[in-house]
Image (spheres, rainbow, N blue to C red):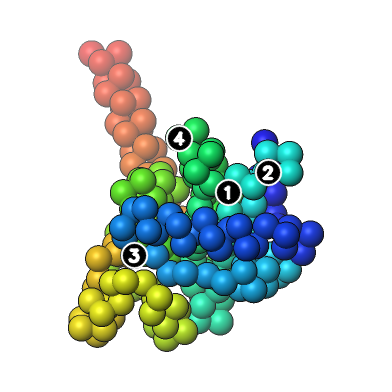
Amino acid sequence: MKIVIADKSHAVYATLIAETISESAKVRGTGIAKRTPEYIITKMENGNAVIALDEDKFVGFCYIEAWGHGKFVANSGLIVHPDYRGHGMAKKIKAKIFEHSRTKFPDAKVFSITTGLAVMKMNSELGYKPVTFSELTDDQTFWNGCQTCKNYDVLQRTEQKMCLCTGMLYDPKKQVEEKKQIKTKVYKRLKSIKENLFLKKEK
């Protein structure tokens, strides 16, 4: 079992990937934007996707979409073949595509819109925070991609302010700030402990 950055040699799996995404939406009964094999191949050729394989058998897939001139990126189309579900593959693929996104677009905000609780949990573990749609990309091309979702009418009625999906965002700048704050709190706590111990010894 391996998870690698996809390239044009993996184009042979594009139709199966598109079909698996479509079938998954039907089974779950939730909204999911459909993707054509041609679109998936483009992502592979641009090095903006990862694919999981069990020797030559398709296991799973996910790809990167860049929006707003690279200010935002989304990890989309996360899918695991039915034969390999229930073994933690989605989490491994999600971690791989997130790592690839951070390497390729280090300054970009990484966002996700999803109806899946499992995906929300994975996002939270990676550092995503729930946000309103107004904090996500305003690139209309992204929102146009929701047209194939069965819940698109909800998005239209709310003027793209909300839908059944939950918006989640990883902001690298905020992550750095939070880490600094945590380090400061830890330092102050250790300093306080040392001062208290010193005072006890003095007594």
- Residue 112 placement (x, y as % from top left): 41, 63
Give the position of the N terminus as an image quadrant: top right
- 177 in relation to 162, above or below: above
Residue type at mark 1 is Gly
CA gap between label 4 and label 2 equals: 17 Å
Give the position of the C terminus as an image quadrant: top left
> Residue drawn at (47%, 69%), measured in percent from left and top?
34
Mark 4 or mark 1: which comes first in sequence? 1
Disc marking residue 149: none
Disc marking residue 31: 3
> Residue drawn at (68%, 43%), measured in percent from left and top?
57
Q: Secondary structure at mark 4?
A: loop
Q: To which residue does mark 2 refer?
A: 57
Q: To which residue does mark 1 refer?
A: 60
Q: Residues within 10 Å of mark 3 (few under 14, many from 20)?
A: some
Q: Residue furthest right?
A: 9
Q: Secondary structure at mark 3?
A: loop
Residue type at mark 2 is Lys
- Residue 28 placement (x, y as % from top left): 34, 53
Q: To which residue does mark 4 refer?
A: 86
Residue type at mark 3 is Gly
Q: Secondary structure at mark 2?
A: strand
- Residue 153 placement (x, y as % from top left): 26, 79
